[in-house]
Structure formats: structure tokens, C-alpha cells
Image (spheres, rainbow, N blue to C red):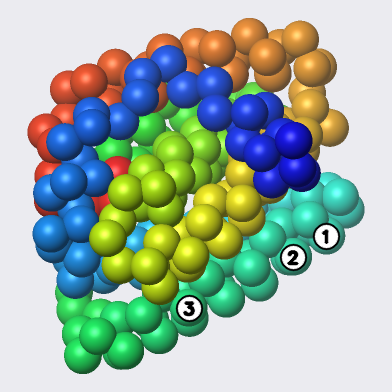
Amino acid sequence: MDASESKEKTILKLKLNTDPRWVDIASKNIEDILVDHAYCEQKAASTGISLIVKYPEKTRLVDELTALVAEEWAHFERVLLELRKRGFELGPQRRDEYVVQLMTHVRRGDHRDRQLMDMLLVSALIEARSCERFKLLWKHIPDPELSKFYYELMVSEAAHFVSYVDLAKEYRDPKEVDARLQELLKIEGDIITNLPVRDDRMH
């Protein structure tokens, strides 16, 4: 087993797999999927920046998220390139109902480090779901160039999941983090169950 396969087995602990219909309809609507994907990468970079700004005293977080933000922005640029090569424009941003619903489960209030833990774990789950979708596109999309593209992104997103969970364990008790991750995994599965299968969304 190579390193990428090992990472994939480590991170894909999602409670519910993507509906197999998704990759079939997504591959027929690649323009919308690429546009939505571009904004997903942009929002991932923005989230990392927001956490750096909010928690500047946490040196490891600042260092690791600085690198992660750079990588997410590079992915944004790569998705833009795939759009341009196919004669597509970026288009307007779409509401990501999946992320909106997940974010409602970040606990607010006086517990600053607890809120950080929740933000990191929600970010980890978004990366894990993205990785799972990238895997489906890699294996099933008929365009060989995009298949290779999504394989490369799948490997990268797997590393991001691990980074977010490790950061959460840096600032909260690992047992608390593991317990909260299990709660959020169930919530994430429920959200996926109740969302419609869309042909124009990455999530």
C-alpha cells in the first residue's frame, strides 16, 4: 500500500457514502461542478485565513494553516485553469447548503478553544467529504485529464483532514476531540442523507 492509499484509508471514516447517482449526473454537468469546486477551494482558503486571524497566538495553528491556505489557493487556481481550458467562466458563487448546515453545529459562546475545536473538526469533515467526492470523480469520470486531476486533489485533501484533526488535538484533550468527532460524523451523515442529490454541487 502506497502513502496515498494509507492516508485514504485513515481519513475516510464518513458514516454515509455518497449516493452513487451523484458521480453519474455530476460527470454530465462538469461546468457547474468545476465552478462549485472552485468556490469550495476559495472558501477553504478563507476559512484558514479566518482561523489564523482569530487565533494568532497559537503558533502551530498559524504555521500549519498558512501552508494549507497556500495549497487551497493553488487548488483554486488549478480549478480555474480547468474551467478556462474548457471555455467556461467562473460564474457566480452558489450557496453551499451542506457547509451552511454543518456550520450551525459549531458551538459558540464563552468557550473559545472549544469553538476552535468544533471549527477544526467541521473543516476536517468538509475535507473528508471532498476527498470522497474527488475519489469518485477520479475513478468514474470519463475525461482522463480530469480523472488525473481529481486523483491528485484527493491525495491532498486526505492530508488536510489529518492536519485539522491533529490541530484540534493540539488544543483540546484528544479524548474530547475523538468523542466530538464521532458526534459530528453522525451529524454530517444525517445532513448528506437529507440533502437532495445535485448535479451542480461538489457537496
The answer to which quarter of the image holds residue 9 is top right
Viewer-nearest of discs 3 and 2 = 3
Helix, strand or loop for disc 1: helix
* Label located before the other in sequence (3 or 2): 2
Q: Is residue 64 left or right of residue 151?
A: right
Helix, strand or loop for disc 2: helix
Label 1 – label 2 distance at C-alpha: 7 Å
Helix, strand or loop for disc 3: helix
Residue 16 point in image, percent of width and height = 36, 19
The answer to which quarter of the image holds residue 95 is bottom left
Q: Is residue 61 left or right of residue 131?
A: right
**Which residue shows up at 47% across the image and 22% down it?**
14
Label 3 – label 1 distance at C-alpha: 23 Å
* Label located before the other in sequence (3 or 1): 1
Residue 105 point in image, percent of width and height = 41, 25
Quadrant in which the N terminus is drawn: top right
- For label 1, count other residues whose C-alpha is less than 10 Å away and answer few (under 14), some (14-19) or many (20+): few
Quadrant in which the C terminus is drawn: top left
Residue 34 point in image, percent of width and height = 29, 68
The answer to whether mark 3 and mark 2 are in CB contact below 8 A is: no
Can the viewer see residue 22 in this picture?
A: yes
Label 3 – label 2 distance at C-alpha: 17 Å
Residue marked by disc 3: 78
The answer to whether mark 1 and mark 2 are in CB contact below 8 A is: yes
- For label 3, count other residues whose C-alpha is less than 10 Å away and answer few (under 14), some (14-19) or many (20+): some
Residue marked by disc 1: 63
Viewer-nearest of discs 3 and 1 = 3
Q: How many marks?
A: 3
Residue marked by disc 2: 67
The kind of residue on which mark 1 rests is Asp
**Vertical comparison of 98 with 74: above or below:** above
The kind of residue on which mark 2 rests is Ala
